[in-house]
Each structure stands twice: as structure tokens, then as C-alpha cells.
Image (cartoon, grey):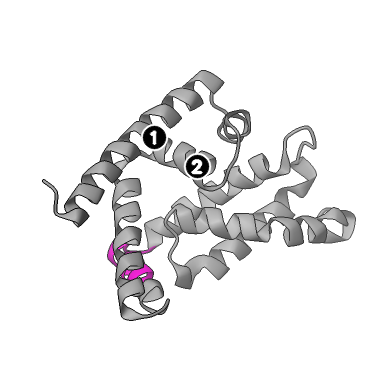
Amino acid sequence: MSGMASAPGLPRIYREQIAFVWRILRRLGVPPDALEDAAQDVFLVVHRRWDAYDPAVPIRSWLFGITRRVAADTRKRLQRLHARAEARADADRLGDAIDTAARAEASDFVVRFLDSLDEDKRIVFVLADVEGLTAPEIGAALGVNLNTIYARLRAARLRFQAARAEWVGAVAGVG
């Protein structure tokens, strides 16, 4: 029999990894009002596929592969405009008007930057610079050669530095 009854480690993995799954879903474009359902979808897939899990593969790498597919499916069902409106609504609840405006502007910059990257660079950038995964972990999660991971990450970081410099200059009224 497969599933939770035969896999006592699943409740522990859920407790230890749910925050990681939520962060990845969010950073791959799933809006806040869809996170709970998407996270449940991830763990339903984990439950169904638990017997196929290879313990030699890091659990986060395996979870990332599942989470990435669920995020893509979820994003296809939702409108991009809806996701941005929700991100702004979240930012509006965060504090006083000045702090909220600054956070919303920074959040919009990050969203615009991530949207400007192709999917391959976006995923590598988010996993490395936001989630803190190592290049070998990312390579394992994506099934991509390590040199390719480094090249994508370097290209994304260079674009981020350039975009940030341009944004800071615009905010400061320089240029």
C-alpha cells in the first residue's frame, strides 16, 4: 500500500519543507490567494509519488521539481494582472504610508526584474540568491549541467546589478 500509511516520514517532511514549498510557489509567480491550494497540490503529488522517491536525491531538489510544475500549472490558470494586484495589496498592509510606498516600489522592481528574465535564469536566480541553494543543488533539482547553472546565474546576477543601478538612479533622480 502506498501513501501516508506506508510512509511515516511524510508528515515530518511536510512540517520541515512546507515553508520552502510556499516560498518557491510564491517566487515562481503563484499569487497569495492561490498559495494554499498550490501547496496542497504539491504535497498531494508527493503523497502519490512517494514510493518513486529516490533517497539519493536531496529532498528539496525532488520537492522543487514537483513545486515548479505545480507553480507553472497554477500560473496558467491565473491572470498575471491578478497576481500583481495581490502583491500590491500585500504591500499596502505592511506599515505606514511611506514605508508601504517604498516596499511596494521595491517589490514592483523585483517583480519587473524577475519578469524580464527568461524562465531558466529566473529559476536559477531565485533558487540561488533568494532561497540560498547551492549550484550543485540547483543542478540536481533541474537536471542541468553545473556549468550551465553557473552561466545562467552569472548572467542573471549581472542583469540584476545593471537593473538595480538603473532603478536606484531613477529613484534618486539621477539620469
Q: Is residue 86 magenta?
A: yes
- Quick one: which residue is furthest to the top in this view? 147
Q: Could you tell me how far apart the alpha carbons at marks 2 and 1 are, in whole angstroms?
A: 9 Å
Determine the residue positioned at 33% across, 59% down: 106
**Snapshot quadrant of residue 3:** bottom right
The magenta-colored residue range is 78-88
SS class, disc 1? helix
Q: Are marks 2 and 1 in contact (CB under 8 Å)?
A: yes
Dominant SS type (magenta): helix
Is residue 72 among the parts visible in the rendering?
Answer: yes
The image shows residue 27, relative to residue 139, as above or below, that is below
SS class, disc 2? helix
Quickly name the residue at label 1: 157
Can you give x and y, in whole percent of width and height, for residue 18 in the image? 66, 60
Q: Closest to the observer: 138 or 53? A: 138
Can you give x and y, in whole percent of width and height, for residue 38 in the image? 54, 63
Can you give x and y, in whole percent of width and height, for residue 159 in the image? 31, 35
Within 10 angstroms of label 2, few (less than 14), some, or many (20 or more) residues?
few
Quickly name the residue at label 2: 129
Determine the residue positioned at 30% across, 54% down: 109
Q: Closest to the observer: 162 or 155? A: 162
Which one is earlier in the sequence, the residue at label 2 or at label 1? 2
Q: Is residue 77 magenta?
A: no
Number of numbered callouts drawn: 2
- Quick one: which residue is furthest to the left in this view? 175
Amino acid type, callout 1: Arg
Determine the residue positioned at 42% across, 35% down: 120
